[in-house]
Amino acid sequence: MIADPPPSDAPLERRLTVFPATALNMANMIGVGPFITIPLLMSALGGPQSLLGWLVALVITVPDALIWSELGAAMSGSGGTYRWLREGFGPRTWGRLMAFLFLWQFLVSGPMEIASGYIGVANYLDYLWPGMTRAGALTAKGGAVVVVLGLLNVALLYRRISGIARLTITLWVGVMLTVGIVLLGGALNFDARKAFDFPDNPWAFSTGFLLGLGAAARVGIYDFLGYYDVCYLGDEVRDPGRTIPRAVITSLLLVAAMYVGINLSLNGVISWREFVPADQHPEIANFIGSIFVERLYGRTAAGVFTLLVVWTALGSVFALLLGYSRIPYAAARDGTFFRVFGRVHPTGHFPHVSLVAIGLLAIAASFITLPIVIDTLIAARILIQFVGQVIALWLLRRNAPAMPRPYRVWLYPLPLIAAGVGWLLVFATTPPKVILFSMAALGVGVGAYFAWARLVGNWPFEGRRESGRG
């Protein structure tokens, strides 16, 4: 990764206002998530007590959303976390390492998050055309569908941001229609005996309960991911000091309420005992939303609903790829990544090289099983991104008190403590193999940074390179 001078292209256009920014976040968050992960969440603790995972996820993500809001409003350039870590930890010292490590883990976690949406599409299409998946993995037919969907997503985003804002709202309408069908169907046909059919001794405190709660919280956090997507598009947001906090907080609270409603709706019609553990009941767990509609309205209606879920998934991966394509772009413009990723389309004014690269990596990541994708992407982000941002905000408050802050974290510093402790607990309850992989990847990333920094004369080797030349 040789740092080159940033390319001199046309700037990005500020077109996103509060409504499309909120719609973008919500489309990102909802997507296919609850329709594929609720069986996983219910399997974590083996019964309705698993709903506690949503609450734990909210206890962590709400204070975290306040952190994203302050940082996004104060430093609204493209790239989000990349810029905040660099500025918070010192743009000429440790911030270079943290920004590099964020980009390092992002090249794994970002495409994996997008890939989870593609995997969900394949699972649901298996309801209409069996043979898309087998034993949790894509078949050749399912893989072909994912490749086509991934290329279509890149093609839809290959345009200027003004057209994307209109398309985002169109996708958001489809998302709301899909959610509305489940919420209305659940409300009209809710059976409390099914929804709250607890197993024996459901609240027994034990190590197994804590690990199960951690697993449920990880699923909940995965489903909430995306409340910050607009922060990656800071250079394309109009009035970011007002737009970003409103979009971040509003989207999280609205979607959290929808998720709990969806979970109760599904469980009030389909007993959790029919699909838990999820890996032993794929005939229901893989497309539980379609089974829900089938039992209420018949097979034909379920087929139509399945296509709506695919539409919803498309809205999610669309929003994800839009935001994530701006991260390598920001790093390249900053001289910390390959120069080509900083190129902007000459007429559309969007980072086309970064868009295509992340889009292709997401397609490749789709051939990993969903549980591994979810655990890995969450664990990979926690230490550098989520915990890193907590520390970065604290450092910025201490070292740059005069920085303009259109929005400030409420009840500071309590949300920072809550978010930091919460993220560390989620990491600690992750499967050991995933923790080892994450720590190994982080260690390799640190080594890669120092090797790269020595090669190009970056911190902490600036003086040594100059003396060597002398």
Image (cartoon, grey):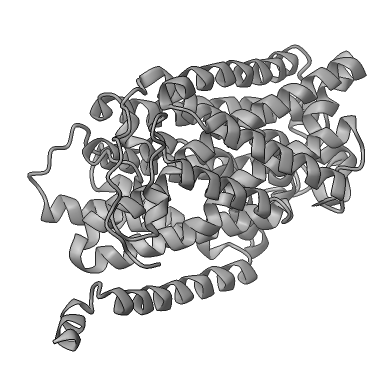
Residue 434 visible in this rendered orientation of the protein: yes
Which quadrant would residue 150 be assigned to in this image? top right
Which quadrant would residue 97 be assigned to in this image? bottom left
Identify the residue at horizontal 40%, vertical 29% (top origin): 347
Identify the residue at horizontal 59%, vertical 62% (top origin): 430
Relative to residue 74, is residue 155 drawn left or right?
A: right
In which quadrant will I find the C terminus? bottom left
Residue 386 visible in this rendered orientation of the protein: no
Give how far across and how far down residue 286 sits, in percent: 81, 40
Which residue is at the front of the view, 367 or 418?
367
Relative to residue 264, is residue 318 drawn left or right?
A: left
Which quadrant would residue 375 be assigned to in this image? bottom right
Residue lying furthest left in this view? 402
Give how far across and how far down residue 360 sits, in percent: 61, 49
Give how far across and how far down residue 452 sits, in percent: 36, 74
Relative to residue 444, is residue 120 drawn left or right?
A: right
Residue 4's place in the image compared with 280, above or below, is: below
Residue lying furthest front in this view? 346
Identify the residue at horizontal 85%, vertical 21% (top origin): 303
In which quadrant will I find the N terminus? bottom left
Image label count = 0
Residue 293's place in the image compared with 109, above or below, is: above
Give how far across and how far down residue 54 sits, in percent: 57, 39
Residue 351's place in the image compared with 452, above or below, is: above
Which residue is at the front of the view, 200 or 467?
467
Identify the residue at horizontal 42%, vertical 29% (top origin): 348
Residue 295's place in the image compared with 86, above or below, is: above
Which residue is at the front of the view, 238 or 158?
158
